[in-house]
Amino acid sequence: MTQQRKVRVEIENVSLAYGATQVLRDVSINIEPGEFFALLGPSGSGKSTLLRMLAGFNQPQSGSIRVDGADITEVSPWQRDIGMVFQNYALWPHMTVAENVAFGLEERKLPRAEITRRTAAALELVGLATYGTRRPNQLSGGQQQRVAVARTIAIEPKVLLLDEPLSNLDAKLRVHMRTELLALQRKLGITTIFVTHDQEEALSIADRVAVLDAGVIQQVGTPTELYDRPVNRFIANFIGSINLLPGSVDTAKQFTSPLLGTRAVPVNATLIGDADLVLRPHAIQLAAPDAARPESLIWIDAAVKEREFLGEFMRYRVETAGHALTVDVPHFGSAGHAPGAAVKLGIDPAKATVLPAA
């Protein structure tokens, strides 16, 4: 199969309510041609509803959806030229793998030779060229997922929609399959929209991510933007773990707290008044009181309350001046710091961000 022509997807001011329940609230997103885009959020955030709206299974009560410049808001699902891989794969158990892949092509009444060619090409692309005569119940979960993808890409859609396609796989296979999905997407060049509630999944493979909560887009950005520069407390808490140090921002955009004094840190342009300094656990250094320490950091006294070995790193819970903080330290085989030990915490204000106080 050849590379698809890359198309833009534009979602503009889309809203949907079921009675008094607002499912999507004035959602607007522009998805770039050929982008691997993720919709991320907790259960009930509206991400799957938005994906089904793109597919045509749900209709917005206001707003519009455009693909490659054409308004498809009122277009029937089968006329949208959009392919969707469902969470449960939706394979026909009485059909062979090849028959499942060919199903959409049969429905489009393509010539038999073209159906055979596209089916073989799709199975080859997902690594199942020799599995055409098997039935779904003879395949592993990962192989079934590949069949579902092959069936979708065989129709050569303009846009590929993936609705939690890895959720039925075990943890190790999920990591492997998301790598395969990304490689396949890059090879085809097809604009892809991927729904997941798994932060690691979204951050590891998406070019950009839209985070939804209660039907509202909270932030759209690259994985590193979401992690390093969350725009609100929900994003900061939902994407990874955080530490909060209370303080305030003055008119000079300086952050002041009893623990750190007055420091220049990244501050939202409109923020003045009570605020919290947000620090990721890995952005804090931890050292013994008598160890050599970089002078570029702010060093404060603390005590280890407890620790948790998580394989790649040790997670410490420490206390300093009445504040409980979490610190993640890479594990290199050393014994580390025992509970009760006095330690020094090194903080780099440049690795922090500031959000309005709750």
Image: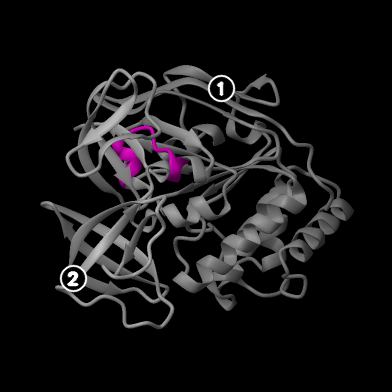
Q: Secondary structure at mark 2?
A: strand
Counting residues from the N terminus, which is met first, the one under dot 2 or under dot 1? Answer: 1
Q: Would you identify the image quadrant in which residue 266 lies? A: top left
* Amino acid type for the residue under numbered disc 2: Glu
Q: Residue at x 63, y 65 (%)?
A: 95
| Direction from residue 252 to residue 165 in the image, left or right | right
CA gap, disc 2 and disc 1: 54 Å
In depth, the one of 124 and 291 nearer the eye is 291
Q: Residue at x 70, y 62 (%)?
A: 99
Task: Name the spot of residue 163 as percent of width and height, x first.
Answer: 50, 49
Task: Name the spot of residue 68 as percent of width and height, x first.
Answer: 70, 26
Looking at the image, residue 73 lies above or below residue 123 = above
In depth, the one of 174 and 60 nearer the eye is 174
Task: Name the spot of residue 41 as percent of width and height, x first.
Answer: 38, 43
Disc count in the image?
Answer: 2
Q: Would you identify the image quadrant in which residue 129 lies? A: bottom right
* Amino acid type for the residue under numbered disc 1: Thr
Residue identifier under label 2 = 306
Q: Main secondary structure of the magenta part?
A: helix
230 in the magenta segment? yes
Looking at the image, residue 19 lies above or below residue 318 = above
What span is colored magenta in the figure?
226-237
Coloring basis for residues? one colour
Q: Residue at x 62, y 72 (%)?
A: 135
